[in-house]
Amino acid sequence: MQPRENKRKHAQLGFSLVETIVVVALFTVVSLAIMESIITFYRVNGYTIAQSAQVDTARRGMEQLVRDLREMTFADDGTFPLVITEAYRVGFFSDIDRDNSVEYIEYQLGTSTMLTKRVFNATGSPPVYHGTGTPDATYTVSEYVQNNLQATPVFVYYDMNGNPAVATTTMTDIRYVELSIIVNIDPVRDPGEFMLRSSASLRNLKNAE
């Protein structure tokens, strides 16, 4: 009698076929509900997530731009550090890779919404810069930049007295640059544009006075 009772108790410990089917069905329903919730979340918040990613990219790009501007210096051939001072374009010399050879750098927002960085290395001896040909390297600083659409300059220049640069301001007078980047991956949708602001004091030019 005792062995038979132990066998019956052992058999009652497992799931029956019906119980197993019910458990599997419940698990499937719960999993589908969770997946649908995740899909809905990304569908509703996908734009906000993408916008945040672009803003973060623009922020890191602006930090690099500020560093390059602050390290502006005379070219290897003696050319003055600052070459181009436009509202959507700046060109200057800077040793951005710390290799004791100065590069010519251009940051530009063209007719598109992409802010780019172009790098030109000096060649030959004595060194010669070719700033109008194919750059040695091109980087995307930020996409979806809406400054053109908003008629907002990316670069604003100031002279040694803190006055905004005007048409008669000479290149050698400029000592300070303000930067603004407006980022929006879709101008007709919320949450709308995000503006990044920073500035760079051209400290190597101050030392040259």
Image: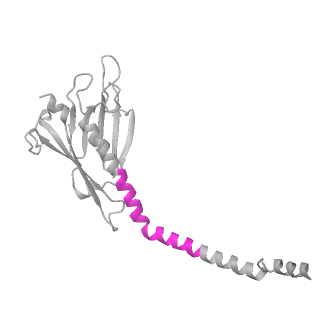
Residue 185, given in percent of the width and then of the height, sits at: 36, 59
Magenta span includes 54: yes
* Residue 138 visible, this orientation: yes
Which colour scheme appears in the figure? one colour
Q: Is residue 140 above or below residue 20?
A: above
In the image, farthest residue toward the right: 1
Which residue is more in the foreground, 135 or 163?
163
Magenta span includes 104: no
- Residue 172 sits in quarter: top left
Secondary structure character of the magenta stretch overall? helix
Q: Is residue 206 above or below residue 108?
A: above
In the image, farthest residue toward the top: 125
* Residue 109 visible, this orientation: no
Which residue is more in the foreground, 176 or 124?
176
Q: What stretch of residues is rendered in magenta? A: 32-57
Which residue is more in the foreground, 132 or 157?
157
Q: Indicate the quadrant containing the N terminus: top left, top right, bottom left or bottom right.
A: bottom right
The residue depicted at 76 percent of the width and 82 percent of the height is 18
The residue depicted at 36 percent of the width and 53 percent of the height is 56
Residue 78, given in percent of the width and then of the height, sits at: 22, 22
In this image, 27 relative to 121: left or right? right
Q: Is residue 22 above or below residue 34?
A: below
Residue 14, given in percent of the width and then of the height, sits at: 78, 77
- Residue 189 sits in quarter: bottom left
**How many marks do you count on the picture?**
0
Q: Indicate the quadrant containing the C terminus: top left, top right, bottom left or bottom right.
A: top left
